[in-house]
Amino acid sequence: MQHDTASTPLRQRPNASSRAPLSSAIPTRDPKAPISLYIHIPFCVHKCHYCDFYSIVDRQDRQEAFTHRAIAELTAVAALAHNPTLDTIFIGGGTPTLLAPHLLAQLLTTVESAFALTDHTEWTIESNPETLTQPIGEVLERSKVNRVSMGAQSFNPTHLKTLERHHDPASVERAVTIARAHHIPRLSLDLIYAVPGQTLPEWADDLERALAFNLDHLSAYALTYEPNTAMTARLLRGDFEEAPDELEVDMYNHTLDRIRRAGLDRYEVSNHAKPGLECRHNLAYWRNRDYLAVGPSASGHIAGTRYKNTPRLDDYLDFSDEGFAPIVEHEPPDPKRSLMDALMLGVRTREGLDAPSILTSADQLHRRAELESAAQSCAGSGWLTTTDTRWTLTEPGFHYADRVARELMGALVTDDETP
Ligand code: SF4
């Protein structure tokens, strides 16, 4: 789902645009350099009320056409990139495991034949508990997929109902059992907290039930109210109230304490993993690395150029340009935007920002003094630790990651750009 909003900078810049095929929109790059691949599968069983990712309710009438198009796009993208070796692959959506097993098998086989994979390639597929069935497990076992990221969200039927998630909590255990029976070595669960009406003990119970699976990775997101979602409309209508800030902070602190006792550690504001089992694909986003994109609404980043495929399935199915999807947003390399992205994405991680590198970039933009001053201001507030080599969030600073990112990015804005 490219589910962490901070991982998809293009989502925040809908004004950049040009309709062009991929072949004319992205620069050539060194095929030996490591690269990642994201594939977006747009189908879901039902539209969850909090979700603003591109997905449509599946009526099983377009899966076949979509898969054929995605295979054509994969083949064309691989050829354009000179069949590179993939460091990481992430199949998100939507709900990729909703694809019919024979179609999913065709897609996975195409990835394996069009690109070079190694024993080290991390290959994640997102799933929902009710769609990780035995036949899907068999398809995954025959492929090189080695990681499942499952959207459990909650084990509490009341809160699942609030989120308009339709799965039975017991289906999480069934799905985990299937993944393990089919030898998928790595497993991550997604949970959501600060759901309206949720108490701290109820969140603690969700966490216990997730950690009971001996996870190597857990993503725990505070519920966010995205514009134009049903959840936000219900909030504005007064159907419920947002969780109080203090409760959200208590839930976050409890999460940290509990996951550390379970042998995991935070490596990004909302992501926790056992040592060495961090999601390398997400790290590639946060480190501003290169990634290719396939599927409707998928966004890619190649050698400083950012682009996004058409987000509508109908347009995607219509494409004919040498197999590439039409690109609806395209931003050529821009040193200021690149530094903005590095600040916004990197500051949220445990490793933080590489100080010499960002200061060199700021120097080239004649904004070094302003950036240093913003960093010192954040340090003075107790949110940022600054050394000659790294700038990292402090423990309290993790609660203000977005604010710190805004302050640092604001230092790059010149007077004539201020609205
Ligand atoms: S399953 Fe995921 S992508 Fe689909 S509607 Fe729900 S949150 Fe969105």
Image (tube, rainbow, N blue to C red):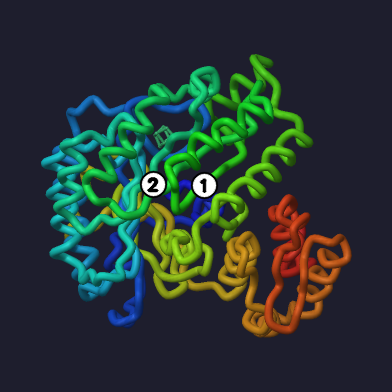
Whether residue 340 appears in this view of the structure is no
Q: Are marks 2 and 1 in contact (CB under 8 Å)?
A: yes
* 27 horizontally vs 239: left or right: left
Residue 411, given in percent of the width and then of the height, sits at 76, 68
Whether residue 280 appears in this view of the structure is yes
**Residue tagged 1:** 219
Residue 149 is marked as 2
Q: From the viewer's perspective, is residue 200 above or below residue 318?
A: above
* 28 horizontally vs 284: left or right: left
The front one of 183 and 345 is 183
Q: From the viewer's perspective, is residue 365 above or below residue 207?
A: below
- Identify the residue at horizontal 32%, vertical 49% (top origin): 125
- Identify the residue at horizontal 58%, vertical 75% (top origin): 335
The front one of 116 and 211 is 211
Q: Amino acid at mark 2?
A: Ser
Which image quadrant for residue 208?
top right
- Identify the residue at horizontal 37%, vertical 36% (top origin): 55
Whole-number angstrom distance, CA of label 2 to CA of label 1: 9 Å
Q: Secondary structure at mark 1?
A: strand
Q: Secondary structure at mark 2?
A: strand
Report ligand 1 position as a quadrant: top left
Residue 142, given in percent of the width and then of the height, sits at 14, 52
Going from N to C along the chain, the mark reached first, 2 or 1, is: 2
